[in-house]
Amino acid sequence: MKRSNPAARFQNWYAWAERPLPGFSTQLPAHLSPASFLLGAGLGLMAANVLALQALPPDFPMRFGSMVLAALGGTGFAWAVYAQRESAAQHRLERWLAPACRWLGIQTTQLLALLFAPLYALTTACLTSNVWDNAFHPVAANMSWLAALGLAVFGGWRVSAEEAHGRPRWSTLAWLVAVVMLAFVMRGTATEFIPVTLTGDEGSASINARQFLEGRTNNLFTIGWRGFPALYYFVQSLSVGLFGNTAPAVRVPAALVGSLTVGALYLMGRAMFGHRIGLAAAILLSASHLHIHFSRIALNNVWDGLSYVVALGALWHGWHHQRRASFLVAGLAIGLAMYFYPSARTLLALGMAWLVVMAVLDRQRFKANAPHALLMFLTAFVTLLPLGLFFVRFPDEFFGPMRAVGLTEQMIQEMAAQAQIPPWQFVIQNIFNGLLAFTVLGAQNWYVPQIPMLQSAASIFFYLALLGLALRWRDSRTWLMGLWLLVFGFIGGLSESTPAGQRYVAAAPAVTLMAAYGLAWLIQLIVDVLPQLARWALPALITTSVWLANQDVRFYFLEYTPNSHFVSRYNFEKLGDTVAEYLAEYLPHVTAGWQVAFFGAPYMGYYSIPSLQFLVPHIQGVDMNYPWGDTRLPPLNSTRIIFVFLDQSLDSLQAIQTQFPGGLLFIDRNTSNKEYLWLYQYPMPENAAELQALAPTISAGEPYWPPYALIEGLMNAALLASLVWGAWYLWAQRRLRSTPAEYASAQPSEVSLASAAPVLPGPSAPLFTETPPNSTAPEVQPAPTAETIVPAPAPVSSIPAVAESKAVAVNPATVVMPIERSGEQVRVTVEMPFGAAVQITVRSLPNGQVRTDVQPPASDTHE
């Protein structure tokens, strides 16, 4: 019996995975005429604004705008009714709009949708942009905004020019799911304990989110805590509504977004540099210590990373492939980015600057993409219009977050004087320091790991990538990555606490993608010098990426987290956070009817700890800002009291124990074994035994998590698994390294050559190419070594089909991009799953027959 070949079985799975995902039709329904569209869109606009007029106060300044919008909707509806009877009116409209439709490549109905999209967004603005907490009609406002987004996408979608071969494959989806799940394991597990405490800022944001659940606010297009847009707090409120007032409830949304960012970076890297570099970048970002940290806290910083990756990745993909859908995705991402952390407000300017550079370097492509770019900006405009009008009405709220952290002229002069340098030199030096955050300087302010974003070897690969891209200075990828990094150098350098870690979260994907590119380039340079090492290229790339990721994961979970408690090396947890953490663990076990008397003056008060108010809102506290016995102390309205003391108030503790003897006393110590918190509960509670057993558990920190030995074991297992995979890969190559004739009996697959791309490349496939994936490469004439003749005569026009059929027969999971034509000859390159590339040349003979030459590379021989 013939032994089964595991490598061959994997090849069969590989061929199945390379099939494209099911497509869908983008054709408009034939019955959706301009009149039919205006009938529905006009009626909807009129109805939404009638509801707005009923809800708006008589003297409200936006009332006139709603009246105009209602009139426009009514006019559109009336014209549609008229056009249903008089077809000539509809034909005239189509003739008037035909030039614009031809330039944009859309139908008349779609152009009307583009005209109505801003009107629906303005309807939302009329109901929300001049108020703070509550929209006058939240349902009408939110539905109008969603309708505006839908109309913008529908109107810009190109019906007939979307390439069918651009559909993603099952393998792409599988890799995407895998990297997202890997990232979520790093971000979404044990969020109650890592980071070690729910900080005051997280508590403030969580309280703001809870206001949506309590009905105190319903406006998505205003601002909330710290001047950040309210949409983020609404998203966070959905999680709080599901899981309650807990740390995981408010941290899981950030973990999900951080994980999606890793998946988006894989797709971006795959599109720009190929699957292997995209996968390596995703591995590095999934383990980035800075990105993990900000994906584990209940703040909106990590949302900007997702916005940047989706917007810039889609923009580049649309530019390079002239894909309308990608431009529309970029427009949505740019518009939605304005609803989250303020650093994303540079995204629009970055995209515009990159397009200007590309217009200079590649005018022909810019002219071809101009309609797509216009629709991208229109989609972004419609998306941010309601919030944008709010900021127009209240400009101080737009600039507030930036003014709070930006370097003012006075600050620059003072710091320049301290450094004894001119102010202009200080600014340049600070911007340079902002750029050094990637590889040299440790982050400051909110997250202080004392190491840069990239450690040791990863920083070397980053600089190699800078060199490699600089050598291709006309490449669109060079300018995109360079501007991305430069923007965050300016953001960090022109704000206080340079480099402040919370302002670099959106730079982490760019930095890790550069490191992956540099690593791949180095490996390729080695392979070019030593071709016999070609088969080791992919295992080296993946194993090195896992090793670099292992370093960051070990640092964050095994070094930073255990030493980030109060009075520890990294001191992420402050005194107020520590007190709040202790009380949040203790107070839920206290029965109803107890009141907290908090002696924390002058350092802090009970209600100065937002995280405590969020976690235990049912416990009422009273700030005791004077010594016990002072007549200025507020009265206590309960006979059951929990007295809480910091070290400044120990005299009051002694007085209270004397006045109320027989209570229950707990003392907590920090990591330096120093007493910092005293809790005295009087009278002795009914569940005193339970509380006495609980107190040591709270004081000890989290005894069940994190299991550091388990984390270290998992890291070792991951590194070992990458080594085992590399060994299996090399073994599988040897099992499958045979001539293409052995695969000639394979049945043609339904995989299109144009849609296929590598998942596991062979040794001869470079880790990256001079041109982006799927770009035309210079033609190389192969010397045929194997020859077959197709007996039936065939016209020259059928030669590409013959080449495709033969390529699929050689390898069902083939990669053939592009099909190179030269006169009456077509040449394709087939990439084997575990072997070298195979070249197939099909050309027409004078007798009308078609000749097919199959040439395996010289290195593809048995050893």
Image (tube, rainbow, N blue to C red):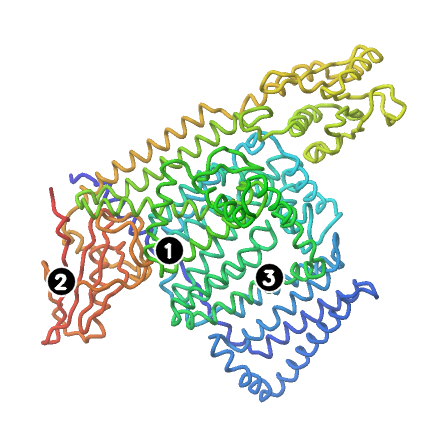
Residue 454 as seen in the image, left or right of residue 187: left
The N terminus - image quarter: top left
The C terminus - image quarter: top left
Where does the image place residue 808, in percent across and percent down from the top left? 24, 59
Q: What's the amino acid at mark 3?
A: Thr
Find out whether the residues at labels 2 and 3 contact each other: C-beta distance under 8 Å: no
Q: CA distance from mark 2 to mark 3?
A: 54 Å
Q: Element type at marker 1?
A: helix
The residue pinned by badge 2 equals 853
Q: What's the amino acid at mark 2?
A: Asp
Where does the image place residue 267, in percent across and percent down from the top left? 41, 52
Give the number of the disc on residue 383: 3
Near mark 2 (Cα within 10 A), the count class, few <14, some 14-19 or many ≥20, is: many
Quarter of the rendering containing residue 5: top left
Where does the image place residue 162, in percent across and percent down from the top left? 41, 67
> Tag 2 or tag 1, which sits nearer the N-term?
1
Among all residues in the image, which is located at the extreme right?
A: 631
In this rendering, which labeled residue sits more in front, label 1 or label 2? 1
753 lies above or below 459: below
Residue 554 as seen in the image, left or right of residue 850: right
Q: CA distance from mark 1 to mark 3?
A: 27 Å
Give the number of the disc on residue 272: 1
Residue 796 as seen in the image, left or right of residue 772: left
